[in-house]
Image (cartoon, rainbow, N blue to C red):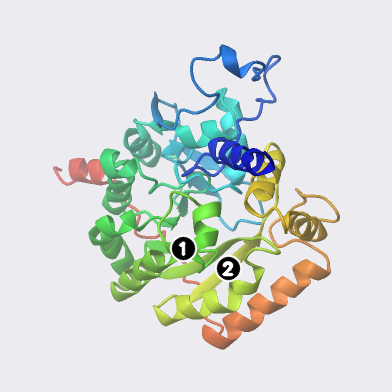
Amino acid sequence: MLILLVFLFMDLKEEEYFKGRGAQLNPNNKFFGHSYVQEYIEGLDEPFLSSDSTKIIATYPKAILSKVNSPDLGFYQSLNPYQGCEHGCIYCYARNSHEYWGYSAGLDFERKILVKYNAVELLEKAFDKKSYVPEPVFMSGNTDCYQPIERKLRITRQLLATFLAYKHPVSIISKNVLMLRDLDILAALAERGLVSVSVTINSLREEVRRKMEPRTATAGARLKLMEKLAEKNIPVSLMIAPIVPGINSDEMPALVKRAADVGAKWASYTIVRLNGAIANIFRDWVYKNYPDGAEKIIHGIEACHGGKLNDSQWGRRIRGDGETAEGIRQLFKIAVKKYMGQQAYPALRTDLFERPNRDAQLRLF
């Protein structure tokens, strides 16, 4: 009888885990006055939250460039053709922004992707304003511009072609090897000093990636992407994000070395912080995936943020504070010095900017 109960419990746990997804629940949207919960499973026609399909939702915003006022980030305007991300990274800070659209930061974030179909038109409109002053645009500041739906929609490729046409600088961060499709445009931008790329890898262990970033490319594939970018003389750096004490904090030296071996010249990192709804989503995930080490992992994160899971204070929210965070900083610093040296990150050019449509009209006179 006891053995039977154990097997029944194991089956129940398997049913509760959504394979191929990061979040394992759909927490209530904080902006909603009411929420729905599962009360009597026998009254449901299908298991609660069991739908694994991804829904694409069309949007047509009025502007595409967002001003960034954070001194931590080093850029001043960003562009995101997609809201929500099918990659399903459990730690993603962008999950909270999904609540502003009326969805949950949990499974909704991974399964309901909002597409800005007029992104290219809006970018051209912004560049064509007489008052516009060129400064680098950061793509994927919120969600990955090369997430799976991009393979079909090709909005990111069209945006890159627009940057090239206007000779406007752009930086990209991604963890998807779909970027290889656009090497031609990226190489043309690089020839003019108009592009830099950061590739995110936070673990070389495949079992960690599958749990933490379920619908992303393997670390090996991302290293190959970095190698191809370097071969085309496209400035490429490694972003180790995020560092989670107790899960991947020991991997920084190996990550920096592997990235340097394939041509990356620079590296950076962030320490995980669990703001807003992400705290409960992450807690649920970590206890399901690391039941024996969950408490240690949670306490490790808290040790980097003054005893809390999140610190929103500019200047320390990304790198953390305290002995644990300082140990991570020193380990990173030593690894970069050993494998990459002290090379300065390239500044992107803004002096080449031109408006092709307007210039074409002027050449008629």
Q: Earlier in the sequence, mark 1 or mark 2?
A: 1
Which numbered disc covers residue 48?
none
For the residue marked with disc 2, what is the amino acid? Ser
- Relative vertical location of residue 188 with respect to residue 253 in this rendering, above or below: above
Residue 192 in the figure: left or right of residue 18: left
Horizontally, residue 246 falls left or right of residue 101, namely: right
Q: Which residue is mark 1?
A: 198
Give the quadrant of the C terminus.
top left
Closer to us: 189 or 242: 242
Q: Looking at the picture, how far across and down is residue 32, in whole percent?
A: 67, 18
Residue lying at 23% horizontally and 41% vertically, measured from the top left: 357
> Looking at the image, which residue sits at the far left?
364
Q: Is residue 230 above or below residue 86?
A: below
Expressed as whole percent of the image width and height from the top left, the position of residue 249 reads 66, 68
Is residue 9 found left or right of 365 in the rendered image?
A: right
In the rendered view, tell whether residue 162 sits above or below residue 205: above
Residue at the farthest front position: 1
Position of 339 compared to 183: left or right? right
Residue drawn at 51 percent across, 58 percent down: 209
Q: Badges 1 and 2: C-beta atoms under 8 Å apart?
A: yes
How much space separates mark 1 and mark 2, taking CA atoms? 9 Å
Amino acid type of disc 1?
Ser
- Tell me the quarter of the picture where residue 362 sits: top left
Whether residue 344 is visible here, answered yes or no, is no
Q: What's the mark number on residue 268?
A: 2
* Residue at disc 2, secondary structure: strand
Q: Residue 138, position in %: x, y?
A: 48, 52
Q: Quadrant of residue 221?
A: bottom left
Please tell me whether residue 259 is drawn above or below residue 123 in the rendered image: below
| Of residues 303 and 43, the one drawn nearer to the viewer in this rendering | 43
Q: Nearer the viewer, residue 286 or 245?
A: 286
Q: Secondary structure at mark 1?
A: strand
